[in-house]
């Protein structure tokens, strides 16, 4: 797909512009999402030509939108402008054999998390009780329910639209007996269930540090927290080390023993700016 998108961008924009733009195209179901380049003042018409060529070469893409703002607000949404094709922002996105109905303007979704969804699901043991604190349309939760054998996955989001799609997706994927959607603040849910979970997912770097103590509170005596962080660093290794120190110090402050069982850069989110995940095994005193 990468090479095809690059070819399309090259044919419309020529090099070297193409090399700066093609990575900013994502396909979500039958919708193409183009993201504005932060440093290039390109006219919307340029993105429209790109979208039209993309739709000509990929006939299954029925609609194209331009993200005109970065991810913002507590629901982690962008603002969009319609570029080409059907004026429709709802689609069915497929990942790891699961289907997710969602509206790209109402619910956060990122195909860049594809590998991460499967990676975390692969770590879940049979019978585990899992809390997903920032679940969006339910991607981590449903993929875990389908690929592992957890006892239950409590799946929280504060955005009513994300909750609505999550409920629908749980039904669509036949996991209603395992995934329990909750509409609300993840902190309150974690606080209301002390010592309940074997594993807690915190896929929202902006709130993870602030809510970390609540995640630990909701863990059983021993458990795993998958915490996502944004880190400024010169290179990837440095970013991972910085996130490790930050969270190991936090665990020390909380008076819990912790070990980093896994860590990786999930993606680069800007120049020298990385999203990092840590798999932290935590033991309470
Ligand atoms: C980065 S998105 C999650 C992506 C999702 N896990 C996935 O894999 O597609 C973060 C989500 O956290 C939700 N959120 C923000 N603040 C929250 C809070 N206090 N409690 C629960 N959910 C929250 C947002 O509505 C958003 O859907």
Image (cartoon, grey):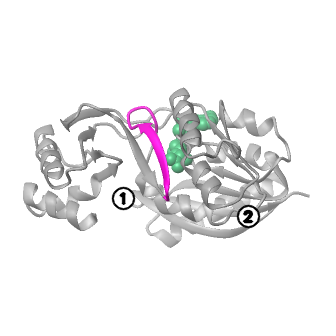
Where residue 66 sits, quadrant-wise, is top left
The verdict on residue 101 being magenta is: yes
Residue 60, relative to residue 280: is it above or below? above
The verdict on residue 285 being magenta is: no
Q: Earlier in the sequence, mark 2 or mark 1?
A: 2
Q: Which residue is mark 2?
A: 125
The C terminus, quarter of image: bottom right
Q: Which residue is mark 1?
A: 271
Taking depth in this image into account, of 55 and 196 the one nearest to the observer is 55
Q: Residue at x 68, y 58 (%)?
A: 247
Q: Quadrant of ligand 1?
A: top right
Q: Image check: 20 left or right of 272?
A: left
Horizontal and vertical percent position of residue 250: 73, 55
Residue 277, relative to residue 218: is it above or below? below
Horizontal and vertical percent position of residue 260: 69, 68
Horizontal and vertical percent position of residue 22: 23, 58
Mark 2 beta carbon near ligand 1 (under 8 Å):
no
Q: Secondary structure at mark 2?
A: loop
Q: From the viewer's perspective, is the residue at label 2 or at label 1 nearer? A: 2
Q: Image check: 173 left or right of 249?
A: left
Q: Residue at x 32, y 51 (%)?
A: 27
């Amino acid at each position: 797909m990468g090479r095809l998108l690059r070819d399309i961008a090259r044919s419309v924009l020529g090099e070297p512009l193409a090399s700066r733009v093609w990575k900013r195209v994502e396909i979500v179901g039958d919708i193409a999402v183009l993201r504005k380049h932060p440093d290039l003042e390109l006219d919307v018409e340029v993105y429209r030509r790109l979208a039209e060529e993309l739709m000509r070469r990929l006939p299954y893409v029925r609609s194209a939108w331009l993200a005109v703002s970065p991810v913002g607000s507590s629901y982690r949404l962008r603002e969009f402008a319609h570029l080409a094709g059907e004026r429709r922002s709802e689609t069915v996105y497929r990942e790891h054999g699961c289907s997710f109905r969602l509206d790209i303007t109402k619910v956060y979704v990122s195909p860049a998390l594809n590998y991460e969804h499967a990676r975390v699901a692969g770590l879940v043991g049979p019978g585990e009780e899992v809390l997903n604190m920032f679940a969006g349309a339910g991607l981590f939760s449903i993929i875990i329910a389908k690929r592992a054998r957890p006892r239950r996955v409590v799946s929280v989001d504060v955005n009513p639209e994300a909750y609505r799609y999550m409920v629908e997706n749980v039904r669509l994927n036949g996991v209603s007996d395992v995934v329990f959607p909750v509409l609300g603040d993840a902190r309150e849910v974690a606080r209301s269930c002390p010592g309940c979970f074997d594993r807690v997912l915190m896929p929202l770097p902006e709130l993870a540090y602030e809510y970390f103590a609540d995640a630990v509170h909701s863990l059983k005596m021993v458990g795993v927290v998958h915490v996502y962080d944004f880190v400024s660093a010169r290179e990837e290794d440095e970013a991972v080390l910085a996130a490790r120190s930050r969270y190991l110090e936090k665990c020390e402050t909380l008076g819990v023993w912790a070990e980093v069982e896994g860590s990786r850069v999930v993606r680069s989110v800007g120049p020298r700016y990385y999203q990092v995940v840590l798999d932290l095994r935590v033991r309470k005193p």
